[in-house]
Amino acid sequence: VNLATVHSARRMSETAEERKKRLQALREGAQKQEKELKFRNYLPRDEELQAGQIKARVAPEIDVPVVEPDAPDAEDEDAVVNVMPAKANADLKRDVERKLEKLERKTQRAMIELTREEDARRMAEQPHK
């Protein structure tokens, strides 16, 4: 029998025993500590559980100072006018145009299909001569 093997086996059994004791202590500690239930948004019907209900907090009042804008200067107005596009919705129209074209094609196809279905229904209902 190799001495190193015996030594490592003894060490493994000691570490296993230590681990076992540590886990048992954790289990006992977990059993002792019962979690307290806290109800923030729920009102329990049981009277014992109602003690765990948390009262709603009220936000403190905040005083917001009101700052009145100064009189606009002529230079500021010119700067705003130069930044704005010539037409207010030109960029929106450009972005939406492709999507509208697709929708228009789909709408036309759907209308044609509905018309065909209606014609087929009428033909089926008509008595043959």
Image (spheres, grey):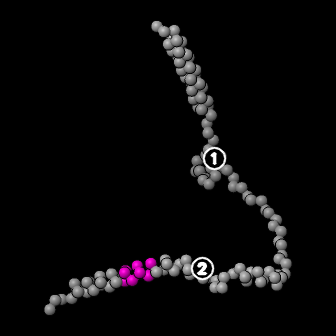
Mark 2 burial class by Cα count in 10 Å: few <14, some 14-19, many 20+: few
Comparing 10 with 79, the one in front is: 79
Q: Is residue 95 above or below residue 11?
A: below
Q: What residue type is labelled 1?
A: Lys
Comparing 22 with 96, the one in front is: 96
The picture places residue 88, in percent across and down from the top left corner, at 64, 83
Lateral position of residue 68 relative to residue 38, left or right = right
Give the distance between the C-alpha atoms of the residues marked 2 and 1, in whole angstroms: 52 Å
Give the foreground label among 2 and 1. Answer: 2
Numbered circle sitting on residue 103 = none
- The boundaries of the magenta stretch are 102-111
Please report the residue visible at 62 percent of the width from the left and 54 percent of the height from the top: 41
Is any part of residue 119 visible from this angle? yes
Mark 1 burial class by Cα count in 10 Å: few <14, some 14-19, many 20+: few
Q: In this view, does 32 lie above or below 6?
A: below
Please report the residue visible at 83 percent of the width from the left and 77 percent of the height from the top: 69
Of mark 2 and mark 1, the one earlier in the sequence is: 1
Please report the residue visible at 60 percent of the width from the left and 53 percent of the height from the top: 42
Which residue is at the far bottom? 129
Q: Is mark 1 on a helix, strand or loop?
A: loop
Q: Quadrant of residue 125?
A: bottom left
Q: Is 108 colored magenta in this rendering?
A: yes
Q: Is mark 2 on a helix, strand or loop?
A: helix
Q: What residue type is labelled 2?
A: Asp
Which residue is at the far right? 70
The picture places residue 85, in percent across and down from the top left corner, at 66, 82
Lateral position of residue 39 relative to residue 120, left or right = right
Which residue was labeled with disc 2?
91
Q: Quadrant of residue 73?
A: bottom right
Which residue was labeled with disc 1?
38
Q: Is the magenta stretch mostly helix, strand or loop?
A: helix
